[in-house]
Amino acid sequence: MDVKPLRLAHAPVAMECKVTQIVPVEGTTNVMVLGRVLRFHIREDLYRSELGLVDTVEMKPVTRLGGPVEYTKVGELFFPGSAYS
């Protein structure tokens, strides 16, 4: 099944997903959305075919952690607004 969603042209990795469940978070107005990944789109220079892996160090991802202002990069932890070297 092709979802054919819009994607950011320069995103190093994108996933096509189908929503499988929407779960209300008790005591809040939030919901948790669960889905199934149908297809990955991976920039060719990031895929290591000999290993069958994506080179995450080369991708240089930044992700949000559980708190409101906690972020991480591969191998690092930093907080916006604090000293960062």
Image (cartoon, helix red, strand yellow):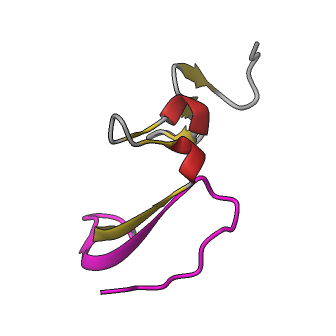
* Corner quadrant of residue 20: bottom left
Image position, residue 26 (x, y; %): 25, 65
Residue drawn where x is 36% and y is 73% of the image: 17
Residue extending furthest top?
Answer: 85
Residue drawn where x is 64% and y is 27% of the image: 79
Image quarter in which the N terminus is found? bottom left
* Corner quadrant of residue 46: top right
Please tell me whether residue 19 belongs to the stretch shown in magenta.
Answer: yes
* Vertical arrangement, residue 68 with respect to residue 34, above or below: above
Specify start and end residues of the magenta stretch as a single range: 1-29
Confirm whether residue 31 shows in the render. Answer: no
* Vertical arrangement, residue 74 with respect to residue 60, above or below: above
Confirm whether residue 27 shows in the render. Answer: yes
Depth check, front residue: 66 or 74: 74
* Vertical arrangement, residue 2 with respect to residue 69, above or below: below
Depth check, front residue: 57 or 24: 57
Residue drawn where x is 55% and y is 51% of the image: 44
Residue drawn where x is 60% and y is 52% of the image: 12
Left or right side of 17 for 63:
right
Left or right side of 50 for 12:
right
Please tell me whether residue 10 belongs to the stretch shown in magenta.
Answer: yes
* Corner quadrant of residue 27: bottom left
Image position, residue 36 (x, y; %): 26, 70
Left or right side of 10 for 52:
left
Image quarter in which the C terminus is found? top right
Depth check, front residue: 45 or 29: 45
